[in-house]
Image (spheres, helix red, strand yellow):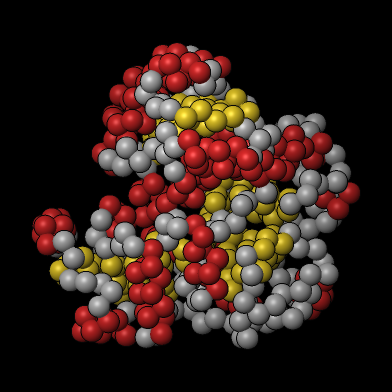
Amino acid sequence: MNIVIAGDGEVGFHLARSLSKSRHDITVVDPNSELLKMLEAESDLLTIAGNSTSLETLRQAEVEKADLLIAVLHEESINIITCMLGKRLGAKRTIARVNTQEYLNDINKGMFKGMGVDELVCPEKIAAKEISNLLTRNISTELFDFANGLLRIYMIRIDNKSLFINKSLIEVAKEYPNLGIRTVCIIRRGTTIIPNGEDKYIINDLVYLITTVEKVEKIKEISGKKDFSIKNAMIVGGGRIGRRAAINLHDKINLKIIDQDIERCNRLANEFDDVMIINGNGSDINMLQEEGINETDAFISLTNSTETNIMACIYAHRQGVKKTVALVENVNYIDVSQDIGIDTIINKKLITASYITRFTLGGEITSSKWLSGIDADLIEITAHKNSSITKKQLKDIRFPKGVNIGGIIREGKAIIANGDTQIMANDNVVAFTIPESAQKLINLFS
């Protein structure tokens, strides 16, 4: 696929790195020539230093040949204009990053499509949805639903209470033959492991498990974690993500929002009758104590400062808060944040890049999900009739490096995959793949 990416920072750069590994032809347009030199040195792609709203620059990028034009600059008006111009010049499909959430209603999306902007992506909306999902699932650090919830992916941390600790996958399978859970990935000290039967579960491993909705209770059992309900949550930062999270959660749990901006607090107070709005500094330990942090079930820090969010979550964890979520904008902090005990990291740039990546994966892909701090994706893909994947049992198929088949939806029923499983035409399959193997995996299903 021929892809032109217009950006001005990490979202565009992460997209470019990821998509270039998947053997796409990538051209990056960015005003920062020094950053482009760094990107070009480490990735197989073309770069153009310039303004993406310039017709000359777009023609230089050969946007008329683009299968996909992606505009992810910080300024949404530039993204919209870039897509409008690119579409007029001949780009087949366009995607614009936006911040104004009213653009996302159906009427406005239709209007933008008529102007040449095919898809709108709002990082704040995606991030808020992730937070809302996390607060309704308690034992997991991350949760993804596939096939309307028939298959679920959980990420749990292996601690000294886990039944799996220091056991290999083969040992676990023998000890729990009817477990109904499959390990698709292990993250160990920042390294991604696609496990085989000999790999062991070690303390502090982050483990991605796939299971059916009927076997969810088993996750609680093997993790050694007690289930708990989130009744009270404290959000520090009432900006776009905090407000959107409150919209999703205010009728489900008791919420407090702390923000330093008095005008923002007044707007939030006018919007939410059932949310306590507090004007103050959410990194002030005395204030957090006064507002009852030790009685809070979940703590979400969404300020503009990555360092503040990390430190606030560490403090909340030490005060006994059961679930902590930090907005971490600096991608270099993601691994260390997870290592020091923060339950969930939200990074708008990586979430946005993952969301956009699904538009490059072809028609067989039903959905895809980004995994925190991992250069990989979970995808849901449909098996075509007579495709290679349908002709052998999984144990007899030579899969690309970095691929693991997790589960299958067949005629409305969920199946956890094992070596003896054979995929059939029209099965929907949930698979884990690293970027450089994504297209090879798709080819098996085509």
Residue 89 visible? The answer is: yes
Residue 245 placement (x, y as % from top left): 31, 58
- Residue extending farthest right: 396
Q: Quadrant of residue 417?
A: bottom right
Q: Quadrant of the N terminus?
A: top right
Name the residue nearer the viewer: 351 or 150.
351
Residue 265 placement (x, y as % from top left): 14, 61
Q: Is residue 382 above or below residue 305?
A: above
Q: Is residue 355 left or right of residue 414?
A: left
Residue 174 placement (x, y as % from top left): 82, 75
Q: Quadrant of the C terminus?
A: top right
Q: Quadrant of residue 390?
A: top right
Q: Is residue 115 left or right of residue 225?
A: left
Name the residue nearer the viewer: 211 or 95.
95
Count of numbered circles on the image: 0
* Picture residue at 59% right of the left edge, 74% below the top: 157
Q: Is residue 340 above or below residue 419?
A: below
Residue 229 placement (x, y as % from top left): 40, 76
Residue 251 visible? The answer is: no
* Picture residue at 64% right of the left edge, 73% below the top: 205
Q: Is residue 61 above or below residue 222?
A: above
Q: Quadrant of residue 262?
A: bottom left
* Picture residue at 46% right of the left edge, 20% below the top: 58
* Picture residue at 62% right of the left edge, 51% below the top: 376
Name the residue nearer the viewer: 234 or 80.
80
